[in-house]
Image: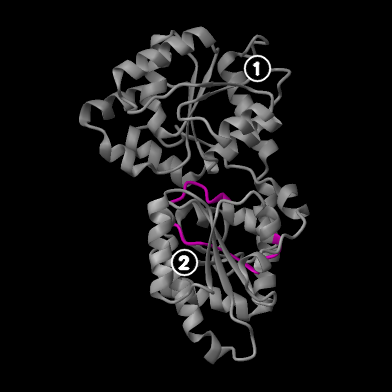
Amino acid sequence: MSIGGVQRGILATLARADHARFEYGVLCTKKPGHWADAVRELGVALTCQKTLPPWDPYQILRLARVLRRLRPDLIHIHMAPMVIPVGTAARLAGIRHIVIQHHNDYARHWDELNLGLRRWEFLLTRRANAVIAVSRAVARMTAARVGLADGGVEVIPNGIDRETFETAAPVDPRAEWRVAPDRPLVVHVARYLPTKRIEDFIEAAAMVAGRWGERHPDRPMPVFAAIGGGAPDLAEAYQRLIRHHKLERTVILAGSRPDVPGLLKAAQLGVLASEMEGFGQVVMEYLAAGLPVVATNLDCIGEMLRDGEEALLVPTRAPQALADAIETLLSDAELARRLTQAGRRKLEVYDWGRAVRAYEAIYDRILQGSPAAG
């Protein structure tokens, strides 16, 4: 199982949790991988139980047996696709205390459910002790879909591991990629998923590269790096698009890297071209690393950053607007500095310690402060 935004958030929670008051364990519902190794490194017990497809009765019964053996006092379910299998198994196992956290819109998940399964998911959600969302945008969508009243979904924004990004030593990949050391580096950090619209980032790079020499004859051509990992077929499609535009020396598909904080410290601009995010954590990580930001104007991004004040925000699926914003910040150092400084002031709000304390306050509320909470 790869380490995406949700998984990184769980790891950040485990690292900052009060283990003297709560005994934490992780139930991994996919094939273990780097994610499982990271959990074990924190000294947290890990159990893996496959739950796909999520409404398979056989898998749910197997999961219920696992939960009876683990006997948790409370289950914190992450992501809508896990509500049916884990919520149902928990009820079968006699577990009464359930928290559900939504990290994104999950429109595709909802579309795949028939009417009966939707109603069952609605019922499980409404009977949960608490429903959490990582942004007001996700809270509104969740409340509307499951029929909860305004305020029925609590908002606990994700945190940012500021120190990791602020203090990282620069890691300059230009030599590795065989590009000149003076070329400005523009990064897009996101897993290779359709919703991340990495093809728009590549198209924008092609537009910037096509006019850069004419508009900025005395400045070196930027280099664009898509840092992430995911489906090999998407990586192949992105590579074909790069070859189509003859950008092999300008756009780098960097894949997954363990040194992202250091790499960001060596970059000049951070970009997010996504058309769907629940929180958009990477834009705040860009700011923590000292980078100006260009991002799509999603509701969750707009909750954190204002267009023209802390970042440049553009419509989704608009490579031309993305290219214009990228070129603007690469060519206007004073604007880039001003936006970055203003954006960094917003980082104070997004602290993992605060988020974890909010989670544990909910656990306390549900469990009535029981010292035996597991």
Q: Is residue 330 left or right of residue 95?
A: right
Give the residue at x 42% y 71%.
243
Rendered image quadrant of residue 336:
bottom right
The x and y percentages for residue 326 are 54, 73
Task: Please tell me which of labels 2 and 1 falls first in the chain.
Answer: 1
Q: What secondary structure prevails in the magenta region?
A: loop
Q: Is residue 55 magenta?
A: no
Rendered image quadrant of residue 20:
top right
Q: Which residues are magenta?
A: 265-281
Q: Is residue 165 left or right of residue 139?
A: right
Question: In this view, which residue lies farthest toward the left?
Answer: 115
For the residue labelled by badge 2, is the local secondary structure a helix, a strand or a loop?
helix
Q: CA distance from mark 2 to mark 1?
A: 43 Å
Packing grade of label 1 (10 A; few <14, some 14-19, many >=20) is some
Q: Is residue 8 left or right of residue 95?
A: right
Amino acid type assigned to the residue bearing label 1 in the image: Glu
- Determine which of the numbered discs, if any, sits on residue 23 in the image: 1
The x and y percentages for residue 258 are 64, 48
Circle 2 is placed at which residue position? Answer: 201
